[in-house]
Image (spheres, grey):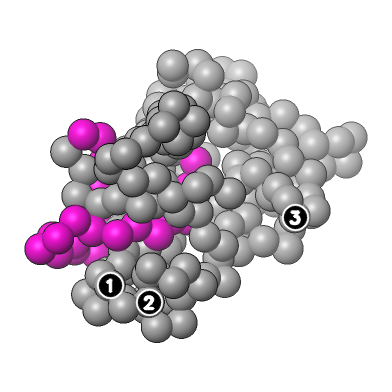
Amino acid sequence: MYKPFKPSSFDKKDKDREDRFKQREPGMYVIDFMEFGNPGDKHVEHRNKPLAQGVGFKYFSLLEATPLPAVRLEIFEKVFFDSESKVRRIVHINYDDLTSVSKTNLEEAVKRIIIDNEKVFVNFFNIAEPVNIRMHVFELLPGIGKKTVRTILDERKTKVFESFDDIRNRVKIDPVKVLAKRIVKEIEGGEKYYVFINPYPNPGIYLNYLEKLYSEYT
């Protein structure tokens, strides 16, 4: 777990940790804002001060952050972790740490991240491979069976997919919806296979597709 970082008084070790954190997650979508804090929070500093929960833009990390003084955040607001950031003291949390409001808003935030990274996630439909000799990774997406898998594979042989609309028109599925539902399931945990979310330290087979997809766009 990352050590919460502070806006000042860093030593070199703290600064290196912050830089790695920002490189991995450049910001988050807010999924809950608690103006008076969260009394049940496991982090003492978040129990009686303004608190935001969010989802990281890039790897769907679940995060808590303290807004700067007098800053009020809106649900689904995009908050960047840069020199002008509205938040500080960012920490990783687990799904069970989310408030009921955050859990309600999680899927919508995930959809927005997918849409923001359309080229990355369209490419998933172009490069995805079988998990083993009996199952293709597409079958891990909700509502996709072997017939739809065959359609996807046949279509991408003819021409690579170029957009979400292209997938909708040629395969007759909503790629944003099925990807978001799969990612939320992986965030919740308890899966055998993890296509997008690294399950560490929990058990599960990590297929590492996000790293593969982002490597083509960095």
Residue 16 sits above or below residue 145 on the image = above
Q: Which residue is mark 3?
A: 202
Distance from Cα at disc 1 to Cα at disc 3: 31 Å
Residue 209 drawn at (x, y percent): 62, 32
The answer to whether residue 28 shows anywhere in this view is no
In the picture provided, is 188 more to the left or to the right than 203?
Answer: left
Q: Amino acid at mark 2?
A: Arg
In this rendering, which labeled residue sits more in front, label 1 or label 3? Answer: 1
Q: Secondary structure at mark 2?
A: loop
Q: Quadrant of residue 166?
A: top left
Near-viewer residue (50 or 191): 50
Residue 5 drawn at (x, y percent): 39, 45
Residue 46 drawn at (x, y percent): 37, 70
The tag earlier along the polypeptide, 1 or 3, is 1
Q: Secondary structure at mark 1?
A: loop
The answer to whether residue 44 shows anywhere in this view is yes
Q: Amino acid at mark 3?
A: Asn
Task: Give the residue at x 67% y 61%.
Answer: 189
The answer to whether the residues at label 1 and label 2 have Cβ atoms under 8 Å apart is yes
Task: Give the residue at x 72% y 29%.
Answer: 129
Near-viewer residue (206 or 151): 206
Q: Amino acid at mark 1?
A: Lys
Q: What range is drawn magenta here?
A: 59-83
Q: Which residue is mark 2?
A: 47
Residue that lies at the very extreme toward the right in this rendered image: 133
Task: Give the residue at x 65% y 44%.
Answer: 198
Residue 6 sits above or below residue 16 on the image = below
Q: Which residue is mark 1?
A: 49
